[in-house]
Every structure is written in structure tokens, then in C-alpha cells.
């Protein structure tokens, strides 16, 4: 089956590409998890984060936003000893801060989807060179999230998040998933 250029032959990556990436996501718990994971990915490859996702779910309380918002400094320090995650103090503190900010939002799902007017933006890129790494919508999302108190939500991270959560559909036209997700 033809897949997007970035999908390697790693079975975990293939499953992620085929079942998750670009599929419209509106579940608040999963949107929150994905936002944090995109932040953990900053400066690294997505496959690195994907391979650590199960462990993150274990050590970050299943991405329970209420519990994560209350994580103590001691709990953060404990997690910094865990080789099963990306041991970055700033990113772990950001997870707690982002949980606190998430809880302050009236309707996080509506806010996130508002940057694409509530419906997936379907792109038709035949070549990966045409695909942007950020857009005006991602820049607006980044600005709004930062204003709300989030960190590790720069415009490039926000665009990757929008792609992953299906807010924008960027499977290339030669990818097998393109037709199903583009409505064709």
C-alpha cells in the first residue's frame, strides 16, 4: 500500500500512519494527549515519541488532565529518572503547565477546531515539497495557546498537531489514505 513519504517500514509508524494521522480527532482526552506528545517531540523525531507513548501514558497518569495539573515537583523529578521517556525537565514542567492551562479553557475542543472553522481543511499535495511546515492557522493557534498559558506550542508544533489531529489532511495524493480522508 502506498503511504506518505515520511512513513518508514517500522510497524508502529505504519499503524500510526494508517490508523491515526490525519483522522479528525475531537475527543478532549486524546487531543490533550496529542498536544503534549507534540511538545515532547520538539527537536526530535516523531517515531522517538511514538515509541515512548505507552510509557508516557503510564507515568503521566494516562494523560488525565486533572491529575497531571496537580503533579508535584517531586513527581517531575522522579520521572526525570525514567529512561522510558524523554527526560527533559522543561518538557515535563510544560506538561503540568499545559494541563493547568487546558483546565482554564471553556471548551478546548471548540477552541482548537476553531482555527479550521470546525471542519478539516483538505489539502491536495502531490509532492512533499509543496507541504508547509506551518500556516497562518497554525500561527494563530500558537498565539492563542501561548496567550492562554501553554508552552511548547510554537507554530511548527501547532501545524504538526493540526496534521496529526486531522484538522488539516495532509496525506499526499499518492498515499492510500488520501482518498478515504479527502472524501474521495
Image (cartoon, rainbow, N blue to C red):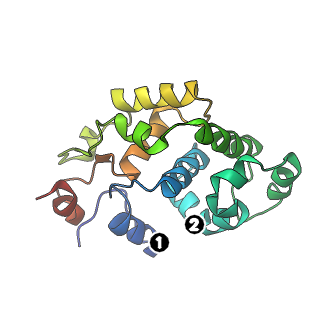
Residue 44: % across, % down: 57, 49
**Does 8 sit left or right of 122 as displayed?**
right
**Mark 1–mark 2 CB contact (< 8 Å):** yes
Q: Is the residue marked by circle 1 packed among few (<14), some (14-19), or many (20+) residues within 10 Å?
A: some
Front residue of 60 and 127? 60
Question: Pointer 1: what residue?
Answer: 12
Residue at (32%, 58%) from the top-left corner?
23
> Observer-nearest residue: 94 or 29?
29
Residue 125 visible, this orientation: yes
User: From the image, which quarter does the N terminus lie in?
Assistant: bottom left
Query: Residue 82, how many percent across, how many down?
Result: 79, 62
| Residue bearing mark 2 | 51
Give the residue drawn at x 57%, y 52%: 37
Q: Which quadrant would residue 129 be assigned to in this image?
A: top left
Look at the numbered disc 1 and give the secondary structure of its residue.
Answer: helix
Q: Is residue 66 above or below residue 16?
A: above
Amino acid at each position: 500500500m502506498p503511504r506518505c513519504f515520511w512513513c518508514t517500514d517500522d510497524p508502529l509508524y505504519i499503524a500510526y500512519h494508517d490508523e491515526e494521522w490525519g483522522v479528525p480527532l475531537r475527543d478532549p482526552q486524546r487531543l490533550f494527549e496529542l498536544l503534549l506528545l507534540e511538545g515532547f517531540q520538539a527537536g526530535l523525531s516523531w517515531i522517538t515519541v511514538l515509541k515512548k507513548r505507552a510509557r508516557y501514558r503510564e507515568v503521566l497518569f494516562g494523560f488525565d488532565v486533572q491529575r497531571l495539573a496537580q503533579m508535584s515537583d517531586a513527581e517531575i523529578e522522579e520521572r526525570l529518572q525514567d529512561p522510558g521517556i524523554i527526560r527533559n525537565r522543561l518538557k515535563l514542567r510544560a506538561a503540568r503547565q499545559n494541563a493547568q492551562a487546558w483546565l482554564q479553557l471553556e471548551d478546548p475542543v471548540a477552541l482548537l477546531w476553531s482555527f479550521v472553522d470546525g471542519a478539516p481543511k483538505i489539502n491536495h499535495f502531490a509532492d512533499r515539497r509543496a507541504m508547509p511546515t506551518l500556516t497562518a492557522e497554525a500561527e494563530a493557534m500558537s498565539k492563542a495557546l501561548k496567550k492562554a498559558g501553554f508552552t511548547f506550542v510554537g507554530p511548527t508544533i501547532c501545524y504538526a498537531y493540526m496534521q496529526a489531529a486531522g484538522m488539516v489532511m495532509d496525506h499526499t495524493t499518492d498515499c492510500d489514505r488520501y482518498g478515504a480522508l479527502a472524501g474521495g
